[in-house]
Image: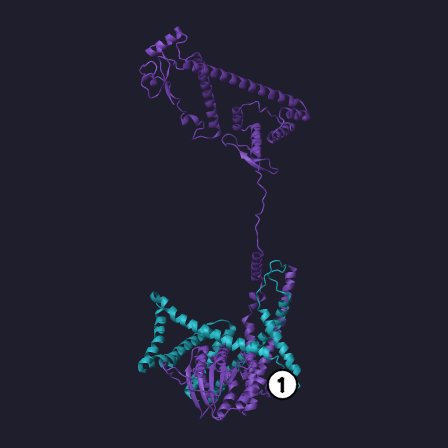
Chain colours: A cyan, B purple
């Protein structure tokens, strides 16, 4: 066991104890550990961005690239300069242009991805599951396929109904504004069941992840202690 | 058109003529100065009988008294002037001494006395008309005065007779004398009768003058106050409800406080304005009301007193958990891992691994934070061991900053991948951007010549499969959406944490992802099927203990919470 393993093991042990000290409430050690993690993460992120993004994709083409590559590299360089100038009060408006460019590209990607990567494939999946060919693909499990399809359809419609907040306006109706139609209300109740199951599964998964992380930490600390005790 | 009359012949001449057109006598300009002066208006200070500084009641009465005396003197003067004016037959004649009478006028008067027809015809007509007018005015004034005196006498007789008769007689008399009796007079009489029945001494107000009544009011006389009350009733309208207020006179005069009943003026009944509300506006109003109701509805979870738990309880629970896990890990508790059969989404991963060619090209996307490194290492270890055995060519890309270090930790330090090619594409800040650029470059057949070549040769790569190692739902969704839209032919596999598993499951149901492994429990199935080294199974015991303890704490918390709710309900019920 070398010195570096002892030092880093000791640091890991202390930081783990400092984080676990939150069990007795917010205290200086917990906050110190939090500040340390945030600071280290920010510094590491800056180094990674400079080393893996700015240097290979911006600075190298500007210094060693051809004239065409340099011209192309001037576009992101100009956006970077505008973004930096926006930090000064006198040039605050300059940062709007690179941010608008980023926002527009992000919105285009998000909308395109949601439509072509989620809505259409998921809708198609719900439709295809009612294909009789799929039902009879596996002999002896036809009824299971049908039930699976019905449950999936019911869950989809129920969940969508639960999030249906619109109201149909009728001029001469006695239905109050806060009351939903009976069908929507019923389907919404069904949707609540599915949403509850989904959230329960997410909670179980979250707990499982946290438990695994805790087990790893305990194992790491225990091994460090055993190592130190065994070495001594 | 104004004209002037010749004093000699009495002929009428135009105003512009300097001589008489009949007798050619020169017009006397001095005649204008002898005409009577116009009556000057009364100065404003004489009209204002109320003094400006002291407008209180005593000064008002004093001024009224003085004005009354002045009025008497003025009336005497007027009578004297009327008598003097009536003695003058000639309207042009002025009360002047004989010395001041001009010669021409003296001649005219003398001639008029001597000769009856010496006065002109027009002048005679004017004089006759004026005499008849004065006579008519005197007769009219005399007639009005007599009528007024008679009416006063008749009223006095009626009132004196009404006091002796009963009520019915009074009504009949008043009906006869005043066919339309005003309402205010009825109320005034009724109030007066009520006071008489109470036995209070009440002098005859109507017999007093206004001046006397004001003096009595100043002295705080009850009768005057009662009359004032009646006048107020008449002015403000007779209300049913009365307000009793204290009317305090001048403290220097009297310290007594007298209660005066002042009727409140009757306000018109409130009528709400008629608002026309359309059905759509009513609908919006109902929606707003429902929103406000929801906003103010108490949320059960928002009770801060419930969330306030003792740190001692938390410490005990954490101590139990840590102790149990430590015992499970280091106390030799090593139960056998469950031998579950692979699920369909597991079978997709197994099938993909089995069908890979030799030395396959696989892209590994690291999209998880350092906090999930333990779980991701555990669940991806069997997968990585299988790829190592196939001598795969791995390309690594990170969409989190920590992914740069985590891929080295996973591939080099933990799995100990040796003798395989690893290409690190580095860090791409956003998952969607990276996935889009990767999918687009794979999709575009011809790279435009004017674009600079990327530093990393992404476009030249074609993968046998893309494996996404993600810690949360958002990162994996970005990759799935972009890659399934741009490169649907490339097999896509997911290795995600347990918390992201349920949410990304629909992507496997829809066929966008051919295989999915979520969490440690599912990785255990893959491990038992793929590798002989049961590294993951060694921690299964601690994991199972931790799950059991957590379930126990949740059940215990629910029971305690229910008991607390019941106690709170009974407590409130007692209140």
Q: Position of residue A84 (x, y in %)?
A: 35, 71
Q: Is residue B109 above or below residue A131?
A: above
Q: Is residue B544 above or below residue A181?
A: below
Q: Where is residue B21 in the image (x, y as percent from the top left)?
A: 34, 16
Q: Which residue is drawn at 43% across and 26% down?
A: B47
- The single residue placed furthest to the front in the displayed view is B22
Q: Is residue B120 visible?
A: yes
Q: Is residue B243 above or below residue B58?
A: below
Residue placed most toward the observer, A17 or A91: A91
Q: Where is residue A174 in the image (x, y as percent from the top left)?
A: 63, 59
A107 lies left or right of B173: left
Q: Can residue B538 be seen in this view?
A: no
Q: In which quarter of the image is the C terminus of chain B?
A: bottom right
Chain under callout 1: A
Residue placed most toward the observer, A5 or B228: B228
Q: Is residue B407 above or below residue B74?
A: below
B529 lies left or right of A41: right
Q: Position of residue A115 (x, y in %)?
A: 51, 75
């Amino acid at each position: 066991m070398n010195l570096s393993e002892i030092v880093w093991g000791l640091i890991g042990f202390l930081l783990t104890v400092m984080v676990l000290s939150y069990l007795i409430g917010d205290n200086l050690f917990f906050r110190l550990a939090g500040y340390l993690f945030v600071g280290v993460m920010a510094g590491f992120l800056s180094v990674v961005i400079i080393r893996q993004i700015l240097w290979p994709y911006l600075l190298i083409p500007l210094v060693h690239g051809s004239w065409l590559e340099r011209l192309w590299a001037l576009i992101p360089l100009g956006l970077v300069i505008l973004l930096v100038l926006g930090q000064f009060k006198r040039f605050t408006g300059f940062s709007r242009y690179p941010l608008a460019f980023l926002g527009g590209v992000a919105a285009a990607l998000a909308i395109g991805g949601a439509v072509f990567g989620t809505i259409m494939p998921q809708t198609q999946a719900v439709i295809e599951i009612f294909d009789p060919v799929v039902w009879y693909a596996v002999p002896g499990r036809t009824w299971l396929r049908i039930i699976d399809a019905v449950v999936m359809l019911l869950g989809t419609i129920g969940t969508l109904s639960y999030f249906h907040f619109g109201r149909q306006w009728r001029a001469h109706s006695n239905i109050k504004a806060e009351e939903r139609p009976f069908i929507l209300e019923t389907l919404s109740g069904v949707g609540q069941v599915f949403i509850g199951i989904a959230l329960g599964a997410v909670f179980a998964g979250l707990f499982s992840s946290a438990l695994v992380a805790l087990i790893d930490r305990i194992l790491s600390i225990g091994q460090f202690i055993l190592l130190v005790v065994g070495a001594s | 058109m104004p004209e002037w009359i010749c004093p000699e012949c009495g002929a009428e001449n135009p105003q512009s003529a300097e001589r008489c057109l009949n007798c050619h006598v020169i017009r006397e300009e001095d005649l204008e100065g002898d005409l009577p002066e116009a009556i000057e208006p009364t100065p404003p200070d004489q009209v204002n009988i109320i003094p400006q500084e002291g407008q209180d009641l005593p000064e008002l009465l004093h001024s009224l008294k003085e004005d009354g005396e002045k009025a008497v003197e003025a009336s005497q003067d007027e009578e004297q002037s009327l008598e003097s004016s009536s003695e003058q037959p000639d309207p042009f004649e002025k009360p002047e001494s004989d010395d001041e009478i001009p010669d021409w006028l003296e001649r005219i008067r003398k001639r008029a006395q001597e000769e009856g027809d010496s006065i002109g015809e027009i002048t005679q007509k004017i004089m006759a008309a004026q005499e008849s007018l004065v006579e008519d005015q005197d007769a009219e004034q005399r007639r009005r005065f007599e009528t007024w005196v008679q009416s006063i006498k008749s009223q006095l007789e009626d009132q004196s007779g009404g006091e002796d008769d009963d009520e019915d007689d009074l009504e009949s008399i008043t009906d006869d004398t005043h066919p339309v009796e005003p309402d205010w007079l009825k109320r005034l009489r009724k109030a007066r009768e009520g006071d008489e029945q109470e036995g209070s001494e009440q002098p005859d107000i109507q017999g007093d003058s206004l001046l006397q009544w004001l003096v009595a009011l100043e002295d705080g006389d009850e009768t005057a106050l009662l009359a004032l009350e009646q006048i107020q009733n008449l002015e403000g309208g007779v209300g049913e409800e009365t307000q009793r207020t204290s009317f305090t006179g001048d403290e220097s005069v009297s310290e007594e406080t007298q209660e005066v009943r002042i009727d409140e003026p009757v306000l018109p009944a409130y009528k709400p304005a008629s608002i026309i509300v359309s059905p759509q506006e009513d609908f919006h109003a109902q929606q707003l009301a429902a929103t406000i109701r929801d906003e103010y509805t108490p949320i059960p979870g928002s009770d801060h007193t419930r969330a306030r738990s003792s740190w001692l309880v938390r410490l005990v629970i954490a101590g139990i958990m840590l102790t149990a896990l430590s015992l499970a890990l280091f106390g030799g508790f090593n139960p056998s891992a469950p031998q579950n059969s692979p699920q369909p989404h597991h079978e997709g991963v197994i099938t993909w691994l089995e069908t890979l060619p030799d030395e396959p090209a696989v892209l590994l996307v690291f999209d998880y934070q350092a906090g999930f490194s333990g779980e991701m290492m555990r669940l991806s270890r069997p997968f990585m061991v299988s790829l190592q055995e196939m001598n795969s060519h791995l390309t690594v890309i990170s969409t989190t900053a920590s992914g740069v270090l985590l891929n080295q930790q996973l591939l080099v330090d933990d799995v100990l991948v040796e003798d395989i090619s690893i290409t690190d594409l580095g860090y791409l800040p956003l998952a969607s951007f990276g996935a889009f650029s990767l999918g687009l470059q794979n999709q575009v057949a011809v790279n435009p010549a004017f674009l600079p070549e990327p530093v990393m040769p992404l476009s030249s790569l074609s993968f046998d499969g893309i494996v996404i190692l993600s810690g949360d739902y958002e990162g994996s969704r970005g990759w799935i959406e972009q890659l399934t839209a741009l490169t649907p032919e490339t097999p896509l596999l997911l290795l995600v944490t347990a918390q992201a598993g349920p949410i990304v499951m629909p992507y496997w149901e829809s066929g966008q992802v051919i295989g999915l492994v979520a969490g440690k429990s599912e990785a255990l199935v893959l491990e038992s099927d793929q590798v002989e080294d049961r590294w993951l199974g060694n921690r299964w015991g601690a994991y199972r203990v931790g799950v059991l303890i957590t379930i126990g704490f949740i059940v215990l918390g629910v029971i305690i919470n229910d008991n607390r709710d019941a106690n709170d309900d009974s407590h409130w019920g007692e209140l």
